[in-house]
Amino acid sequence: MRRIGVLALAALLAAGVSSHAQDSYPTQTVKFVVPAAAGSTTDTLARLVADQLARRWGKPTVVENIAGGGMNIGAGTVARAAPDGHTLLVAPPAPLTIAHLLTRDLTYSPQAFVPITLLAKISNVLAASKTLPANSLKDLIAYAKANPGKLSYATQGPGSTAHLSAAQLEVLAGIKMVAVPYRGAVPALNDLMAGNVDLFFDTLATSVPLYRGDKLKILAVAGLERAKAVPELPTFPEAGVPGFRSITWFGLVAPPKTPPALAQRLNRDTVEILRNTEVADKLANLSLEVGATSEADTVRFFNDEASLWSKVIKQAGIEPR
């Protein structure tokens, strides 16, 4: 009986120490690693979140861009960081869910990261060149079947959202197209508008202004619902491809083995700043929908996305490189 009392007291003291450690967090500059170049949507979002959290914590934050290796260099850096909450990763889907299916000898496991929250998401759209002889998704599929291998689509490289989205369309529609890699969305869009490539799965944020300016077509919206920015455009299921979805999203994760209490603190603080009206308005200006998910909902979301794209990778026969 006495031993149980001693153990209970020890547990309470340990819990108190752990709670105090989380209350005093952060004790130094918090670094947000972005595995992409400065100026990207991921980078813009990370800087917004970092700035707001710095104000909340009263401690400095920095954003470090570690690009290259299909975003795996930056992700690997965070995976090896101390699990003390002072190095965090802001990233789009691949390094958080499916990088191990796309890259041989990966130096980290996406599943080992500790999910904090979904920061934001945005629907993708299927943008098309004005020169393409198809004005609807049904027209496109019919054209592709009549001209196998003739249609081309832009990507930001193997395993990018644009690449996997086009692969999903090929599988569901029973068509074959040719992938053309680019060093980012801007050169891809430039070539799309010039008619040098036929298609590109892009985000609402960058394609809608060009669509409104009559620089390109948008054949369908890849979200589950019609987009407020272009309510006249159908979703993929409405346009004849049921089961298709493709969104770009951005998650915040901590290094493997980050203590649960610290993860909870990070989730609470980040969700609160994301729900701030000022932040929500800034995200809306970027055409981003606020995430602000709980830890459990973040895990479920990551798992759902991993399941979707793992299936696409398998069905499309995409091999790791």
Image (tube, rainbow, N blue to C red):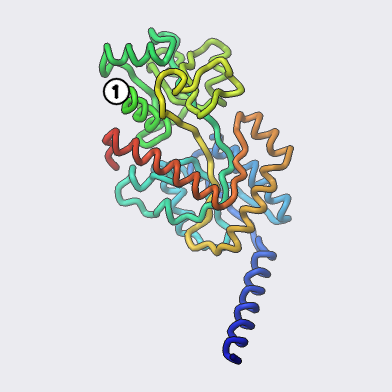
Picture residue at 43% right of the left edge, 46% below the top: 97
Which amino acid, by three-letter code, is at mark 1?
Answer: Gly
Mark 1 lies on a secondary structure that is: loop
Picture residue at 49% right of the left edge, 47% below the top: 300
Picture residue at 50% right of the left edge, 57% below the top: 255
Q: Quadrant of the C terminus?
A: top left
Vertical position of residue 36 compared to residue 286: above or below: below
**98 on left or right of 249:** left
**274 on left or right of 199:** right
Camera-side residue of 97 and 46: 97
Where residue 292 appears, x then y in whole percent? Answer: 62, 44
User: Callout 1: 10 Å neighbours few (<14), some, many (20+)?
Assistant: few
Residue positioned most to the bottom: 2
**145 on left or right of 51:** left
Where residue 133 appears, x then y in whole percent? Answer: 38, 7
Vertical position of residue 278 compared to residue 170: above or below: below
Where residue 235 appears, x then y in whole percent? Answer: 49, 22
Circle 1 sits on which residue?
174
Q: Quadrant of the N terminus?
A: bottom right
Picture residue at 41% right of the left edge, 25% below the top: 242
Camera-side residue of 124 and 216: 124
* Total numbered labels placed on residues in the image: 1
Camera-side residue of 22 and 69: 22
**80 on left or right of 103:** right
Vertical position of residue 273 compared to residue 197: above or below: below
